[in-house]
């Protein structure tokens, strides 16, 4: 029950006092936790709905307190897993038809120009803007749920502040991560130029390379990425859209993928087209994955993890995609500006989350698209200077989040002190209430330690 809260905040365990109010009675469904927050799972009282837009029951009214313990009408771990692992999605009743369409598309894809492909994709994505859940253009349900529980914690413990380990090193307000997926031969040929562009703005990115069939993966390409200070990861096996067709086929391909991961010296992986099945990830010899979108309205596989923070799937750290892909922006939405990205960045920064991008070298060769990317780099550079944003490679984010997950916040001589490897980069933060609004404050000078009310 308490693990997601304590893992997210890394606060003293005494503050994670959540229990289940009563046995869970309903089938998994949508319910609210406050008027504006839709969740999915079983609840112990009230009712849940099969659809998020049907005015589901507000379970916040059924929260109760027993001294400093908070009794919830749902299992917090179950609800968080349902969101992050996309278990709220209904079983598809058109799986065979979808598979036939997908197979036909990938069979003809090499013969289709971008103009034809984008027309077909626009037809496929019709109605994307009417999907009620996850929330577009950024869904922060996981963070909002945990923040609401932190507000209840402050009230139940009758304290002015709850200390926790801040999310990012050196007190950075949020994190930014750039990734480049190399789709075809044209993109592979543009990688050197793209690295020069990123270099000029002081940006380092990871390149995800398809190891088989799509283009020659030469030692020159791999070495140019490594030796320029960028990161090299594996993207799928052959980008045919079939990686997750069956468990048997996935395991066969996973063995080949693992050989490339070892040969490339990679730690990260991304599946083609953002296809995903987190329940199978344990077969991959990786430290982190980059395949789960935040709100997948414009992805062939719908859903989304509803969070803008890293999270663990077993031993693997998921670094979700939290902004719209460049291809979708240019060719599905027809938008050659950074206005949507700016809006998404703003929403993510409000939660102090991870701003992550996919920019394909293939799709910014043309001047019009490249100018949009240059405008994005200029905007990100300015934000980094003004807003204390940590710009980091995926491997650095993975390393930090793993270190933070092992740190402990302890009281010593009346002060809060962070213990554990990497703690010299960590900062103590404090959650407080201003009225009913939860606020955070990061400080190099720790406040006096406060005890839980008994």
Image: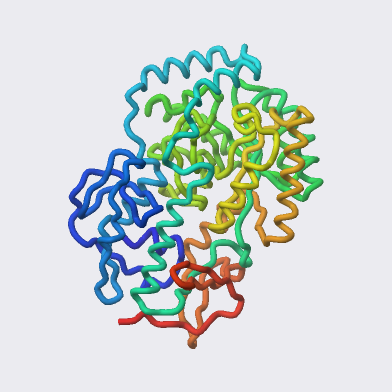
- Residue drawn at 44 percent across, 62 percent down: 147
344 is higher (above) or lower (below) than 360: below
Q: Quadrant of residue 16 in the image? A: bottom left
The answer to which of 321 and 368 lies nearer the viewer is 368
264 is higher (above) or lower (below) than 411: above
Q: Is residue 45 left or right of residue 147?
A: left
- Residue drawn at 55 percent across, 39 percent down: 269
439 is higher (above) or lower (below) than 227: below
The colour scheme used here is rainbow
| Quadrant containing the N terminus in the rendered view | bottom left
Residue 33, position in %: x, y? 34, 55
Q: How many marks?
A: 0
Q: Quadrant of residue 340 in the image? A: top right
Q: Is residue 392 left or right of residue 59?
A: right
Q: Is residue 283 left or right of residue 43?
A: right
234 is higher (above) or lower (below) than 171: above
Looking at the image, the residue that sits furthest to the bottom is 413
Residue 72, position in %: x, y? 27, 61
Residue 167, position in %: x, y? 54, 62
Q: Quadrant of residue 64 in the image? A: bottom left
Residue 118, position in %: x, y? 60, 21
- Residue drawn at 48 percent across, 87 percent down: 414
| Quadrant containing the C terminus in the rendered view | bottom left
- Residue drawn at 59 percent across, 80 percent down: 445
């Amino acid at each position: 029950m308490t693990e997601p809260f304590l893992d997210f905040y890394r606060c003293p365990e005494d503050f994670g006092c959540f229990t289940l109010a009563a046995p869970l009675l309903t089938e998994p469904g949508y319910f609210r936790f406050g008027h504006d927050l839709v969740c999915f799972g079983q609840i112990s009282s009230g009712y849940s709905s099969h659809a998020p837009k049907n005015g589901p029951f507000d379970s916040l009214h059924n929260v109760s307190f027993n001294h400093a313990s908070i009794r919830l009408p749902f299992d917090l771990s179950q609800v968080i897993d349902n969101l992050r692992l996309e278990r709220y999605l209904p079983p598809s009743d058109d799986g065979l038809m979808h598979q036939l369409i997908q197979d036909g598309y990938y069979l003809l894809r090499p013969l289709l120009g971008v103009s034809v492909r984008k027309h077909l994709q626009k037809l496929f994505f019709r109605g994307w803007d009417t999907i009620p859940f996850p929330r577009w253009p950024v869904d922060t349900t996981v963070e909002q749920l945990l923040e609401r529980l932190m507000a209840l914690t402050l009230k139940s413990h009758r304290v002015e502040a709850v200390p926790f380990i801040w999310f990012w090193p050196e007190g950075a307000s949020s994190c930014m991560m750039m990734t480049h997926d190399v789709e075809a031969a044209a993109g592979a040929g543009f990688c050197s130029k793209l690295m020069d562009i990123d270099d000029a703005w002081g940006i380092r990115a990871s390149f995800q390379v398809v190891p088989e069939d799509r283009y020659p993966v030469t030692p020159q390409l791999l070495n140019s990425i490594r030796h320029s200070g960028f990161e090299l990861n594996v993207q799928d096996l052959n980008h045919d859209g079939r990686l997750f067709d069956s468990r048997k086929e996935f395991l066969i391909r996973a063995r080949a993928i693992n050989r490339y991961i070892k040969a490339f010296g990679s730690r990260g992986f991304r599946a083609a087209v953002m296809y995903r099945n987190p329940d199978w990830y344990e077969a991959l010899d990786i430290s982190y994955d980059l395949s789960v979108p935040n709100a997948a309205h414009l992805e062939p596989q719908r859903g989304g993890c509803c969070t803008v923070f890293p999270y663990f799937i077993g031993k693997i750290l998921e670094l979700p995609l939290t902004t719209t892909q460049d291809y979708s922006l240019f060719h599905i939405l027809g938008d050659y500006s950074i206005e949507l990205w700016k809006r998404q960045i703003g929403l993510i920064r409000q939660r102090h989350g991870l701003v992550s991008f996919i920019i394909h070298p293939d799709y910014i060769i043309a001047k019009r698209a490249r100018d949009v990317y240059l405008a994005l780099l200029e905007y990100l550079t300015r934000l980094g200077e003004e807003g204390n944003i940590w710009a980091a490679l995926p491997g650095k984010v993975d390393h930090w989040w793993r270190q933070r997950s092992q740190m402990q916040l302890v009281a010593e001589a009346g002060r809060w002190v962070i213990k554990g490897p990497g703690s010299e980069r960590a900062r103590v933060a404090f959650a407080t209430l201003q009225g009913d609004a939860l606020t955070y404050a990061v400080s190099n000078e720790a406040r006096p330690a406060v005890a839980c009310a008994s």
